[in-house]
């Protein structure tokens, strides 16, 4: 699980959220190429909270994105 959380952390968008493109299913290099969406960000936060504490910088950035989305 830690490897997955580390990967999610590495593809977090600058605005604190995460996004997804259908292109990422065929080309993994496109995994971090999409604008953030509330649904993708919420799903990623649920995963990250199983590994990182709620006051982790990555988690807080995602929550901040959701509060302003």
Image (cartoon, rainbow, N blue to C red):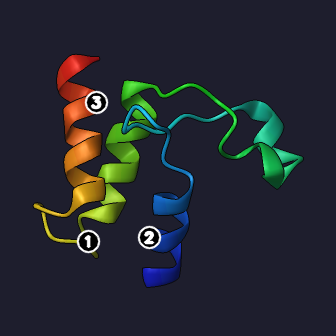
- The residue sitting at the top extreme is 69
Asked if labels 2 and 1 touch by Cβ distance under 8 angstroms, the answer is: yes
In the rendered image, is residue 1 in sight? Answer: no
Q: Residue at x 50, y 39 (%)?
A: 13
Which one is nearer the viewer's eye here, 56 or 31? 56
Q: CA distance from mark 1 to mark 2?
A: 9 Å
Taking the view exactly as shown, the residue that stands out farthest to the left is: 55
Give the foreground label among 1 and 2.
2
Residue 60: x %, y % from top left? 19, 49
Residue 61 placement (x, y as % from top left): 26, 44
Residue hosting label 3: 65
Give 63 or 15, whichever is nearer the viewer. Answer: 15
**Residue topped by disc 1:** 50
Helix, strand or loop for disc 1 = loop
Question: Residue tagged by mark 2?
Answer: 5
| Residue drawn where x is 87% and y is 48% of the image | 27
Q: Is residue 59 left or right of residue 9?
A: left
At mark 2, the secondary structure is helix
Q: Residue 66 appears at what percent x and percent y? A: 25, 28
Residue drawn at point x = 48 percent, y = 48 percent: 12
Furthest-front residue in view?
14
Q: Earlier in the sequence, mark 1 or mark 3?
A: 1
Location of the C terminus (image quadrant)? top left
**How far apart are the alpha carbons under marks 1 and 3?**
19 Å
Cα separation, mark 2 vs mark 3, equals: 18 Å
Q: Earlier in the sequence, mark 1 or mark 2?
A: 2
Comparing marks 2 and 3, which lies closer to the viewer? 3
In primary-sequence order, the first of circles 2 and 3 is 2
Describe the element under mark 3 as helix, strand or loop.
helix
């Amino acid at each position: 699980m830690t490897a997955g959380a580390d990967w999610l952390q590495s593809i977090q968008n600058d605005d604190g959220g995460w996004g997804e493109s259908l292109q990422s299913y065929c080309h993994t290099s496109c995994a971090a190429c999409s604008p953030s969406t509330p649904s993708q960000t919420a799903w990623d936060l649920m995963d990250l909270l199983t590994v990182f504490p709620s006051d982790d910088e990555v988690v807080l950035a995602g929550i901040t994105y959701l509060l302003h989305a």
